Image (tube, helix red, strand yellow):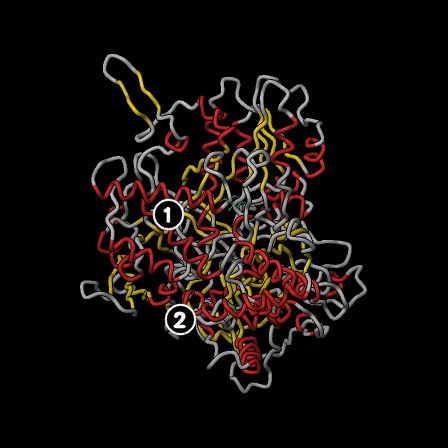
Amino acid sequence: MDKSNDVMTSGYNAKVEAFRDEEYPMLKGSVYLDHAGTTPYPKSLMDSFVRDMTSNLYGNPHSGSSSSQLSTSRIEDIRLRVLQFFHADPADFDVVFVANATAGIKLVVDALRAVPDGFDYAYHQASHTSLVGVREEARNSLCLDDHQVEEWAAGHSPFDGHNEDRPTLFAYPAQSNMDGSRFPLRWSETIRRDTKSSRNRTYTLLDAAAYVCSSPLDLSCAETAPDFTVLSFYKIFGFPDLGALVVRRQAKEVFNETKYFGGGTVDMVVCLKEQWHAPKNQFLHERLEHGTLPIHNIIALDAAMDAHKRLFGTMKEVSEHTAFLHQRLDRGLRSIRHGNDRPVCTIYSPEPTSQASSGPVVAFNIRNSQNAWVSLAEVEKLATLKGFHIRTGGVCNPGGIASALGLEPWEMRQNFSSGFRCGTDNDIMGGKPTGVIRASLGALSTVSDVDAFVNFIAEFYQDLTLPPALAAQTTRPSTRADLCVHSISIYPIKSCGHFQVPSGVDWEVRPEGLAWDREWCLVHQGTGQALSQKRYPKMALIRPTLDFDRGELRVSYTGLVSARQPQEISIPLSKNPSLFRPPTTLGSRSSRVCGEEILAQTYASAEVNEFFSGALGVPCMLARFPPGGQGKSMRHSKAHLQKHQLPSSLATSVSKTPQLPGSFPGDRPPSPPDSDTERSAQERRILLSNESPILAITLPSLDALNEEIRRAGSHKGEISPDVFRANLVIAPVSRSSQRSIEPYAEDTWSNLQIGEDGHQFEMLGSCRRCHMVCINQDTAEKSQEPFVTLSKTRRFDGKVFFGVHMAAVTSQTRFPTLRVGDVVVPS
Ligand SMILES: *Cc1c(COP(=O)(O)O)cnc(C)c1O
């Protein structure tokens, strides 16, 4: 890009900086880099929409009242304005209002499916999921790469033995929503022209949803334009939730075979004795907009286009500004290198050489200095804490992801059968990432947004100083340490406050964990999902107490409640079936805990459920998952030794470089921790805890962490052990004890003996952490620490760890007990 352009965009940048805080108050303290997901809406747009709504009455169109007439005329004006926005002549094009781009695609598919002999379908491999799904309705379908499309454009149809009577649909994105690659608009014409001679036609569908957010789309030449163009307005303007299907009139015969008609699409319908109707036929949109139009959404579009123009000028200006920022982001990320000169970011998006070949999106993954991939989920957690809005994962672009990441179909199926699902945490499988990090820019992005993001990646992922070899590998467990059980906590209701075991009380330890730990949970009344503090921090203020004298679980809520809401409630500890809802006749409803399907019994008492729903402001029910269940009433531990815990001789094997936290041994990727084999090897039962029977932390590790945080100056006060929600806190007998342990010595323990009788416990591996550790368990307030510091000091294999999982070695007949002050001897 030349200098003059830089000057121009710096004016634009200053303009946006000047109104950003006022127009986007909800972005305060955050950096928005998910324009490919949706765009934030400016305040002045909402204000002017409210003004319009409160000064005019808009009725249902199609009647003579003044309110109805007003709607009709506004909608027709806005329809024209949409065409003008894309430089489309109303003589050549019609606009059909739809819910979103996907609904526009479905309208075209509905029409083609109604053709007696069906249709054939080809789509570009960078297509959004909503385009890929069209193939399920087609007689034949093909996924094409650039080369195959160019061949087709040159006259070689990819379908052999194509039925001459059957229409073909070719669909592709103007811009990939995954990596921002752009594809030639001329394809719309060349592919269509190729088949003009044959009896049946090829139609072209352009998915412009991603492209139009940051670029002008010019449909002024009807001869070369796509037959169908789909888009979503919320992606350009932030509001309203509305989309459009722009149809080239020459292609409108496609809709002739559609059969269904709904209100508003017919001139006359006869039902009695005869079945006859006359579709409206003046305008195509009249036939395709079934039922009442989304009147208020369409009217809001007018305000949205006004606001966008007022704030950002033309789409050409937006495209130049975003192209300039794109270069800066791309260069910035490419330039971050580790101390050993390896790049931090592996970028999948094309280099921003021209606006024709790429839009303002950077899709990438991060590697550590030893070339191992950093988990996407971890990057997302940290980015979220630091106020960055980005998207990670498969981003609804299966073909684009598979080709960028080199994932073969068999690998994707294998990942699926080892439990990978869209939106889960295990995102590095078989040594390969399963998704991308996507930063996408839009009209309101600024230079400081880009710089903040580049600095964030450098600050947390660039490894300049080769860190000292891991404490875990140098520290040998000190057999002489005087350690004891400092405190014992159980969490009767998953994700809620703890119950501290009083000193002097012996607490039973079962194979599945401490007695009464995580036996209850709260499930959403609608979805059956177990609620988590991650989403509902106020759960920390729900404090359960076990009262064995009265046989009750007493629960109080320490947050603010309405006057009608009790502050405390009691639930019998009894498992009397009358307390629970009977299983429905359709089989009892299942719930989900950490994505796993379980059968828990929900309480029948409206009073109980209202107590929890009222406290959290979420419609939920209390559910119980007692020990001893079978099938879906049973769960298993997922904890396992992490690579940073292995003796260095095993972990480094072939690698000559010093073993660093998180490194893969050069050419021998280890088996993914979540693979089938390891899971089946761990048939250890648990209740509703996330991963394992017992979670322990040590105070020397917490002290070390607090020291790091103090040094960084990033937090007021000490981090409390409570945030880690451990069952056992292990500490030196006295804080001044000379015979303490090194921080993180627990990483190397394989067994613990606890108590006078020397009960045996087996260590199961480090505990992976998320930003839930940032919730203050006394106040339910969120901060950035300790996760930010943990991410810098305790990240291995791109994942963050603190504390260890463990389980009692028990016989089924006699369970050990623990009490505060018990001696702890590691080995
Ligand atoms: C967002 C997007 C879609 C889907 O849009 P919806 O509004 O969800 O229907 C389709 N294709 C591309 C390229 C997109 O970016």
* Residue 655's disc number: none
Q: Pinpoint residue 410: horizontal percent, then vertical percent.
A: 66, 38
Mark 2 highlights which residue?
Answer: 781
State the quadrant of the C terminus.
Answer: bottom right
Instruction: Farthest residue to the top: give it.
Output: 273
* Residue 528's disc number: 1
- Give the class, few, some or many, for how many residues have Cα within 10 Å of label 1's Cα (few <14, many ≥20): many
137 or 165: nearer the viewer: 165
Give, as a three-letter code, the residue at label 2.
Glu
Instruction: Farthest residue to the left: give it.
Output: 564
Position of 466 with respect to 281 (left or right) is right
433 or 116: nearer the viewer: 116
Can see residue 760?
no
Q: Residue at x 52, y 81 (%)?
A: 733
Q: Is the C-beta separation of discs 1 and 2 under 8 Å?
A: no
441 or 17: nearer the viewer: 17
Sequence-earlier tag: 1 or 2: 1
Q: Quadrant of residue 307?
A: bottom left
Element at label 2 = loop
Give, as a three-letter code, the residue at label 1.
Gly
Position of 664 with respect to 523 (left or right) is right
Q: Pinpoint residue 695: horizontal percent, then vertical percent.
A: 50, 64
Q: Pinpoint residue 623: horizontal percent, then vertical percent.
A: 34, 52
300 or 555: nearer the viewer: 300
Q: Residue at x 70, y 54 (%)?
A: 670
State the quadrant of the N terminus.
Answer: bottom right
User: Is the residue 568 above or below the residue 35 in the image?
Assistant: below
- Give the class, few, some or many, for how many residues have Cα within 10 Å of label 2's Cα (few <14, many ≥20): few
Q: Pinpoint residue 604: horizontal percent, then vertical percent.
A: 25, 48
State the CA–CA distance, disc 1 to disc 2. 26 Å
Q: Residue at x 45, y 26 (%)?
A: 255
Element at label 1 = loop
